[in-house]
Amino acid sequence: MRLAEAPPNPWFSWEYVERNAQDIARALEQHASLTFQAVVIAFVLALPLGALAHLRPRLAGPVLGVAGVLYTVPSLALFAILAPYTGIGRTTVLIGLVSYALLVLTRNVLVGLQGVDPAVRDAARGMGYGRARLLFSVELPQALPSIVAGLRLATVTTVALVTVGVVVGYGGLGQLMFRGFRSNYHAEIMTATILCLLLALVCDLVLAGVGRRITPWARVERPV
């Protein structure tokens, strides 16, 4: 008696992509929008926090300490803590993602501001720049390379963390991964994984290009 052969379970199937194109596009859009919103909100919070820590060095420790504590809380535990108060869905995931991006962005803002050449500060003060004007006109522009580097790192990290949101029913491409694991369907898992990698790569390249455009002085000329 011959045993029936198991149905094929490939790691990638274009047929699966075609049959589920709408579902995949919806998950990708959710993933990208969560990433964008989380990084923007985290940056809006991190910029003044980093500037405050720079202007008031005594606050640098507490600011980075609080952000560090939030960063070290396991994502599953954080979502479990938030869910009873913020519910199941987008809000809970967004709060968690912002919490994780905050440390990277705040630290890079602070490092960038602290790394400004003292001679540049002295020259600006000699021209009559006050503290606020010095910060906005001299220090922040000089800190842009570090800030952009923080944005790139936070964005790539957030793309990966969005998938964990599946535990509260809002994980973007993580939904496809989880569904693929439950049904042992390799193509679904691999498709979601590849899209996550591509999304992270595209975001990183875009931010790198923007960074080069807004910081032309940071480009290193190659010797002839």
Image (cartoon, grey):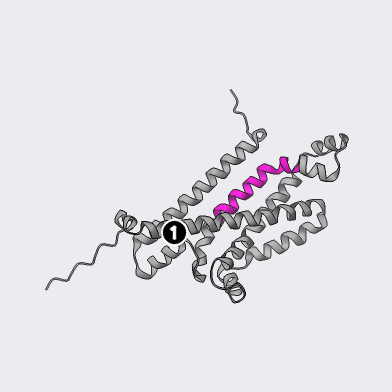
Residue 102, picture quadrant: bottom right
| Residue bounds of the magenta highlight | 139-157
- Residue 132 screen position, x and y as percent: 82, 46
User: Residue sitting at 74 percent across and 53 percent down?
Assistant: 48
User: Residue sitting at 49 percent across and 67 percent down?
Assistant: 166
51 lies above or below 129: below
| 171 relative to 73 in the view: left or right | left
| 139 relative to 196 in the view: left or right | right
Which three-letter amino acid code belongs to the residue tagged 1? Arg
Q: Secondary structure at mark 1?
A: helix
Q: Give the mark count.
A: 1
Q: Which quadrant of the figure contains the N terminus?
A: bottom left
For mark 1, does the 10 Å Cα neighbourhood hold few (<14), some (14 to 19), or many (20 or more) residues?
A: few
User: Residue sitting at 18 percent across and 70 percent down?
Assistant: 4
Return the residue nearer the eye: 98 or 181. Answer: 98
* Residue farthest along the top direction in this orientation: 224
Q: Which quadrant of the figure contains the C terminus?
A: top right
Per the image, the residue denoted by label 1 is 26
Asked if residue 189 lies in the magenta stretch, the reply is no
The chief SS type of the magenta part is: helix
User: Residue sitting at 62 percent across and 57 percent down?
Assistant: 101
116 lies above or below 78: above
100 lies above or below 76: above
- Residue 29 screen position, x and y as percent: 48, 56
| 73 relative to 177 in the view: left or right | right
Asked if residue 151 lies in the magenta stretch, the reply is yes
- Residue 61 screen position, x and y as percent: 77, 59
